[in-house]
Amino acid sequence: MSQTTVLFTAEQISQRIDELAQEIRRDYGETEELLLVGVLKGSIHFLSDLTRRLGDNVRVDFLQTSSYGKGTKSSGIVQIRKDLDESIEGKHVLLVEDIVDTGTTLKYLLELLQTRLPKSLKIASLLSKPEAHLVKIPVAYLGFSIPKHFVVGYGLDHGERYRNLPYIATLQED
Ligand code: PRP
């Protein structure tokens, strides 16, 4: 059996995304088109809530990587399972993630996407776990820093479970 303990309620998450969306709108302005790239699957709810708070000059695309499989530890090897549909050359790109854990996934994606010559490339992540970072990742828009616990909910899974929780919780495995 696994037990969950709420870390951030749906209301706390929503308020924080309001603030992040304001910052993003302020930074990019209304005239610059912004391409939000959601990293599947964990970013689904964050991307959805974020895009609906931004203006209409926004496009959406998806990438899928995987490094965790069914366990709670990163394998350290990032695989691209689904690449972008459109070219990012000359575009303002905002990579949208649910969590920076070791930082391995985003390090790989930043290096990959930079080779495709975007006009700008920044990261928005709902969560970051500083004690777990193995590489330094510049997160322009961060929701919350959290301690080194395994968290689930609001997109984050354990063996594909819990993604649909409307809140974020820590998971204690027995
Ligand atoms: C999770 C999460 C991030 C990554 C973070 O994805 O969504 O993409 O791990 O870990 P890292 O900083 O140690 O690289 P996962 O590969 O589990 O796929 P998922 O989003 O489909 O759950």
Image (cartoon, rainbow, N blue to C red):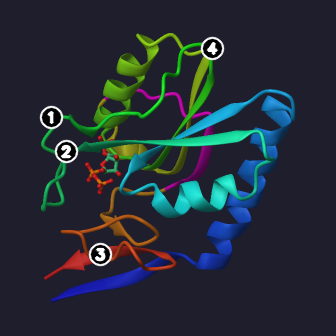
* Mark 3 or mark 4, whichever is nearer to me: 4
Is 121 situated left or right of 17 in this image? Answer: left
Neighbourhood count class around disc 1 (C-alpha, 10 Å): few under 14, some 14–19, many 20 upward: few
* Residue 47, magenta (yes or no): no
Tell me if residue 146 comes above or below residue 106 in the rendering. Answer: below
Q: Are marks 2 and 1 in contact (CB under 8 Å)?
A: yes
The residue shown at (86%, 29%) is 31
Distance (Cα) linking label 4 and label 2: 28 Å
For label 4, the residue is: 119
* Mark 3 or mark 1, whichever is nearer to me: 1
Neighbourhood count class around disc 4 (C-alpha, 10 Å): few under 14, some 14–19, many 20 upward: few
Look at label 1 and name its amino acid.
Ile
Region rendered in magenta: 135-145
Distance (Cα) linking label 3 and label 4: 39 Å
Q: Position of residue 9 (x, y in %)?
A: 58, 78
For label 2, the residue is: 67
Look at label 2 and name its amino acid.
Ser
For label 1, the residue is: 77
Distance (Cα) linking label 2 and label 3: 19 Å
Neighbourhood count class around disc 3 (C-alpha, 10 Å): few under 14, some 14–19, many 20 upward: some
The answer to whether mark 2 is within 8 Å of ligand 1 is yes
Q: Quadrant of the C terminus?
A: bottom left
Is 68 situated left or right of 94 in this image? Answer: left
The residue shown at (18%, 46%) is 74
Distance (Cα) linking label 3 and label 1: 24 Å
Q: Secondary structure at mark 2?
A: loop
* Residue 139, magenta (yes or no): yes
Distance (Cα) linking label 2 and label 1: 6 Å
Q: Are marks 1 and 4 in contact (CB under 8 Å)?
A: no
